[in-house]
Image (spheres, rainbow, N blue to C red):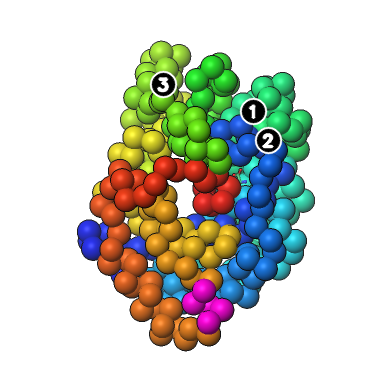
Amino acid sequence: MIYDNHKRPITYLRLAVTDRCNLRCFYCMPEEGIKYLPKHQLLTYEEMERVVRVLAQLGVSKVRITGGEPFVRANLMDFMRRLAVIDGLDDLSMTTNGVLTAPHVRELAELGVRSVNLSLDTLDRERFHRITRRDELPAVLQTLDALLAAGIQTKINAVVMDGQNIEDIGPLVELTRNQPVDVRFIEEMPFNGEGSHYPVLHWTHQRIVDEIRAQYPDLAKLSDPPFSTSANYQIPGHRGTVGVIAAFSRTFCGTCNRIRLTAQGTLKTCLYDNGVLDVRALLRNQATDAELTDAFLRAFAHRPVNGFEAERQRDTVTESMATIGG
Ligand code: SAM
């Protein structure tokens, strides 16, 4: 196992397989004028597979596929099949918006994908359309049903946005009553691809918990699993759980075990950093596995202590979460 300079193990990679998305969530991407990366600038599946193999040898045992929207990239399931058999990788999971996912759920389960994060900010079709700028709620709900039917542990991630979906907090929590689903509310972060409207955070993790507790006074705190980014709760008698992720307040950096690889092959050792290693350049300059390993170890030895330090070390945040791999 590899530890960083703050004695945190590095065991979890979030791998963005594309920067493209079929939704246009206003808090993530501008509606128009997005400069997608040309294809040759994206890592190929072969390149990504090699990086995962090298990292798995260093102790990374969990990989979450993300993006952009993973299913927008062609032949994603071929890639998943190749990842599923990598030695040392014992947890392969995915974050998806669910628009194109339903037809692949059965195969995901067969490959051993045990957990999927489904992004869903509202259960109201009109609000979904307004937030995502696409009328795709029915397809997403089909994916939710398919995931639950396949027995895949499903976490619904909902970004809480002032004046946009506060009325959805209750209905989303209500999903946990009869379904074994974990609904997690996330503080809005500045990664909206515009850099211009850095959110003044009205809905902090504490306020979100207060809102849930106002509706469900018997909300009970659960103990959080190691390395959890969410503070977890349950309403007694409900099958699922409720979590709150302080993504903006950054309360969980002390136990952060995760790194990210963007679709263009930039390593981030903190969500808020500006990219610390050009892995694509190494790969395309014929670096050996030993050279890749050295470069990763150097990066892990210089991790910022938390997201605030990472943010101070860079210029203004201008990127979209879709290019980072959320
Ligand atoms: N397309 C996939 C999906 O929708 O799940 C994966 C990528 S998406 C960028 C990953 C997650 O990042 C989503 O749950 C999305 O809501 C979240 N996200 C995007 N922009 C965000 C922001 N500014 N603040 C908080 N979360 C954000």
Say left or right for 139 vs 285: right
Sooner in the amino-acid sequence: mark 2 or mark 1: 2
Secondary element under disc 1, as helix, strand or loop, is helix
Q: Which residues are magenta?
A: 281-285
Percent across and percent down for residue 51 are: 51, 73
**Ligand 1 sits in which quadrant?**
top right
Q: Amino acid at mark 3?
A: His
Residue at x 33%, y 73% (from the top left corner): 297
Residue 131's tag is: 1
Ranked by sequence position, the earlier of labels 1 and 3 is: 1
Residue 161 left/right relative to 234? right
**Of tags 2 and 3, which is closer to the observer?**
2
Residue at x 66% of width, y 50% of height: 35
User: Is residue 17 among what the camera can see?
Assistant: yes
Kindly give the residue lying farthest to the left in the view shown: 6
How far is disc 2 from disc 1 in space, using C-alphas? 11 Å
Q: Nearer the viewer, residue 261 or 146?
A: 261
Q: Is mark 2 within 8 Å of ligand 1?
A: no
Q: Amino acid at mark 1?
A: Ile
Q: Quadrant of residue 284?
A: bottom right
| Residue under label 3 | 202
Q: Position of residue 16 (x, y in %)?
A: 57, 57
Q: Nearer the viewer, residue 298 or 50?
A: 298
